[in-house]
Amino acid sequence: MKKIRFAAIFAAAAIAVVCAAGISARESADITVFRPAINPRNPKDPMVRAKARYEKETGGKVTLILGDWGNWQSKVLTYMAAGNPIDVVFARDADFPKFYVKGYVQPLEKYVDLDPVVNGVHIINKQGMDSCFKYDGHYYLASHKTSNHYWIIIYNKTLMEEEGIPESQQPLALYEKGQWTWENLRKLAIKLTKDTSGSGTIDRWGFGNWWTQGFAYMNGTSFVKSNGNGNMSLNFSDQRIQEALSFLEQAKKEGWYQQDNNIAKDGIQKRTLAMFMEREYMASTILRDSRDELAYVALPVGPGDKNPRNVFECDGYGIGNGSKNPSYAGKYINYCLEEWYKDDIANRKKSWPQEVLDMTPAMEKKAWYPGTTDSALVDIMNDFLGEIIWTGNSPSAAIAAYTPKATVLVADANKPMEKIERLPFKTISLDFRSAKEVSYFPAYEPDKHPGVKIAQASGSDAIGKGGLKISMDYTKDGSDITATISDIKNVALVGWREYKVDFDVKAVKKPGDGAYVFIQAYGDDANSWGWNTQNINGVNEVVHVTKYITGILRNGKMALKIGGHNMNDFVIGNLVISEKN
């Protein structure tokens, strides 16, 4: 009896404390937190340190939801679709204004202390928050000062001196003279690009990066315009976009630009790159791994940029829209901001080059966050720019090819998220032993690709006793052919779920070099998910394939698209589409 009475008194006291703190008694101190790539077993991880502080202070439990950078947005929305929104959500400037318009996060100023102080320092990144995360008078993400990152050029000063380039003609000196332009970047890069081994092949490039859209930002523009209230419009017609893409095309054709991240990411250290565009925090890692003297400078200015600004990005933490525990989420966010700030400051003092630390105040005076304008196009940006970098198409051809897709994506980004509807889904299993199952996969655009035929596999072509035989000839119909898009009345994936796709495949006619079969969930020409490929080399060899389709963040039914690259006739068998556990 005494134990029961004590428990009742304790519970009443806890409720009183919660009410005194302005927290609804309906809220639970047990919360969920998501940031990609958290290591919950690393006590030094700032997210884990914040978890420990929170649990000690509130008595609640923090569940760290695990996920990687490849599918993290789908993770957030999948929880929303299940009716259990994540309480604390990580996001970046490049996720806005879409996160605001779609309602993925909610206003947070009621729940988060927006003036936290650590060791006498006000740590809120108000500059970034006002530029990226404030709409209609409300903040949707809280950001700490040390998440405010700017892009720079890191260059190998020793290498330039070895090539006879005097300090007065190196990037920092040119910047200080107001002459750090694209044309001077190009001249330096050409001088520094070499075949150092005498093999007849370039093995050192003058300039490299992986963030190709930065070419537009260096020219003072972006691929999408924003009115500041969340509404976006396509900006492909801006002359500065054409200039940026033309400069990119020129850089690639002249051979001094390297965009392959396998080479670029450690090119400075390996001396396979002379100048590298990256965020300022990477300077410490590159300096640590390099034996040469390095130097640092702001980004060069393109010819169309009449008001040069410094390209920044930032991130922060929001409260998931529909969170049942917003007050507790706000408490965790404050711990999180403080732990990240302390961690970042310690790292800067320990390993950052002094030159970069000295740059920061001046860079912040003219900060610009162009990533917020391109959140609508993130799904196609790499493919769009790849038209120029890898395919070799002209800027005008790339713009013409991607304008319809980009227009649809921008229009969709401007619409509030519709109410999530999770349709039922049952595992699909097809061995194609009947003509009926084959009929579920009609030939796609037969007028455009008359050589593509769909039939039931038989005899030696069959896999088991059936199979979907897809006949095509890449030499006549093109290297990339969509052969079939399933009839959604019979074969459909539904939104807000993740899928495992198993099938067997074999080529029955010899494919071309680098051939592969691809599958994908297909909504329309601007909305497809789960690009999966399987390389095909030999003939009549059955290969079992397991792939995954994630991130279908929309309502309704989606078809399964099947096609091939440099493929001739092949057969699909034993197709099973099941929900991913």
Image (cartoon, grey):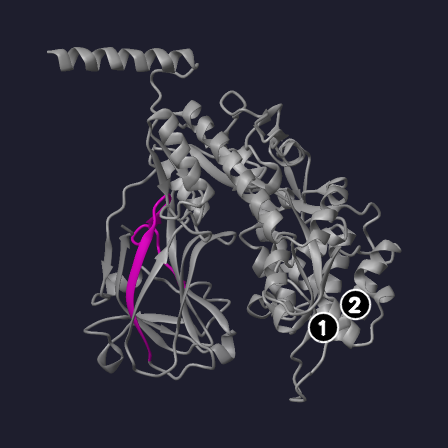
- Could you tell me which residue is drawn at 49 percent across and 40 percent down? 90
Give the answer, above or below, for where 264 lies relative to 145. below
- The disc at residue 256 is 1
Looking at the rendered structure, the secondary structure element under dot 1 is loop
Looking at the rendered structure, the secondary structure element under dot 2 is helix
User: Which is more toward the observer, 268 or 467?
Assistant: 268
- Could you tell me which residue is drawn at 37 percent across and 44 percent down? 495
- Location of residue 13 by image quarter: top left
User: Which is more toward the observer, 460 or 46?
Assistant: 46
Q: Mark 1 or 2 closer to N-term?
A: 2
Return the residue found at the far left.
1
Location of residue 405 in the rendering, given as x and y in whole percent from the top left corner: 57, 52
Location of residue 294 in the rendering, given as x and y in whole percent from the top left corner: 71, 63
Give the answer, above or below, for where 244 lies relative to 369. below
Pointers 1 and 2 in contact (C-beta within 8 Å) = yes
- Could you tell me which residue is drawn at 25 percent across and 61 percent down? 437
Is residue 180 visible in the rendered image? The answer is no
- The disc at residue 186 is 2
Is residue 112 visible in the rendered image? The answer is yes
User: Which is more toward the observer, 375 or 203?
Assistant: 203
Give the answer, above or below, for where 324 lies relative to 315. above
- Could you tell me which residue is drawn at 57 percent across and 37 percent down? 414
* Amino acid on which the number 2 mark rests in the picture: Arg
Q: Start and end of the magenta stretch?
A: 484-507
Q: Residues within 10 Å of mark 1 (few under 14, many from 20)?
A: many
